[in-house]
Amino acid sequence: MREEVALPLLEGGARLANTPAEVAAASDVTFTSLPGPYEVDAVATGAGGVLEGIQPGSVYIDLSSSRPTLIREIEPKFRAKGCHVLDAPVSGGKTGAASGNLAVMVGGDREVFDRVKPILDAFGDKVFYAGEIGAGSVAKLVHNMIGHSVRQAIAEGLTLGVKAGVDPEPLWECVRRGALGRMSFLHEGLVRTMFRGEFEPASFALNLAHKDISLATELAREYDVPMPMSTLAQQISLQAMNRGWGQADSSSTVRLQEEQAGVEVRAPDVDPERAARFITTHPDAE
């Protein structure tokens, strides 16, 4: 244990404990935020862990980005002691943690969530109930996976644009001020299409989208720019075209993913107008 790391907290009135069990024994709500599943399991259920010290009626909340299966295995052990578990991974990074600009994605019993939400609100300004235990961890992994994939696509686009002769700053401005930068598909487009299973009439036809991405990958070959994500997206759009979906909405490609995954993503009660208002009420989304 490195006591010096805790000095700022101790100076603010916190008390030092030697083990997670000691923390849990003295707390109604115990939080952990750890690097990964191995550490979560050790701190939660290992020797001197949270489970050892937690008292009946208390709540254990794990903020780590971890394995959903693990928290689902841990939860019954706490329930057997009359305790509650929530998984509540956060998104926002170090700057968000310092400013309180954090999204908190929570899985577990809804009644327990409602009870501790004021505590979560103290460090996160966007606290969401995702569903039963493990749902928060699933949502966080999906969030990060999408983010890293989008980052790769952005890197491909910007390297192509700069190598093809556009200065970085105006290129970046063009991208972020367009529909992509506003994330209009995430906030509105998929609500109108994927969530409802309706891809006609088209907002932007698949055949036009396929033409655009084909021209982009053609330009990449001209300038010798590797485009693995974009090439894959082109091939997926071609598969959708071969299904006869050329006049349908460009988002029809999601149907191929749904088929291969064996699941349909439907939420027809989400209001697309309300979702679209996010873009205008959150200027930083632009």
Image (cartoon, rainbow, N blue to C red):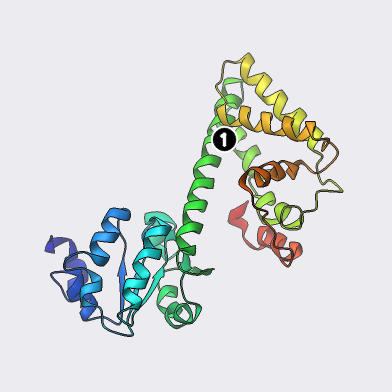
- The amino acid at mark 1 is Ala
Residue 177 x %, y %: 66, 44
Q: Residue at x 56, y 36 (%)?
A: 154
- Identify the image quadrant of residue 57: bottom left
Q: Residue at x 57, y 15 (%)?
A: 224
Q: Left of 93 or right of it: where is 279?
A: right
Quadrant for the N terminus, please.
Answer: bottom left
- Identify the image quadrant of residue 65: bottom left
The answer to whether 102 is drawn above or below residue 199 in the figure is below
**Which residue in the protein does label 1 denote?**
153
Residue 142 x %, y %: 51, 52
Q: Residue at x 77, y 28 (%)?
A: 211
The answer to whether 37 is drawn above or below residue 61 in the figure is above
Does residue 185 appear in the picture of this structure?
Answer: yes
Residue 85 x %, y %: 38, 73
Q: Left of 284 or right of it: where is 141?
A: left
The answer to whether 116 is drawn above or below residue 154 in the figure is below
Q: In terms of depth relative to the viewer, which is nearer, 230 or 198?
A: 198
The answer to whether 208 is drawn above or below residue 139 in the figure is above
Q: Residue at x 67, y 55 (%)?
A: 265
Q: Left of 223 or right of it: where is 147?
A: left
Answer few, some or many: residues within 10 Å of disc 1's Cα (few below 14, many 20 plus, some between 14 and 19): some
Q: Left of 140 or right of it: where is 42?
A: left
Does residue 63 appear in the picture of this structure?
Answer: no
Residue 121 x %, y %: 45, 74
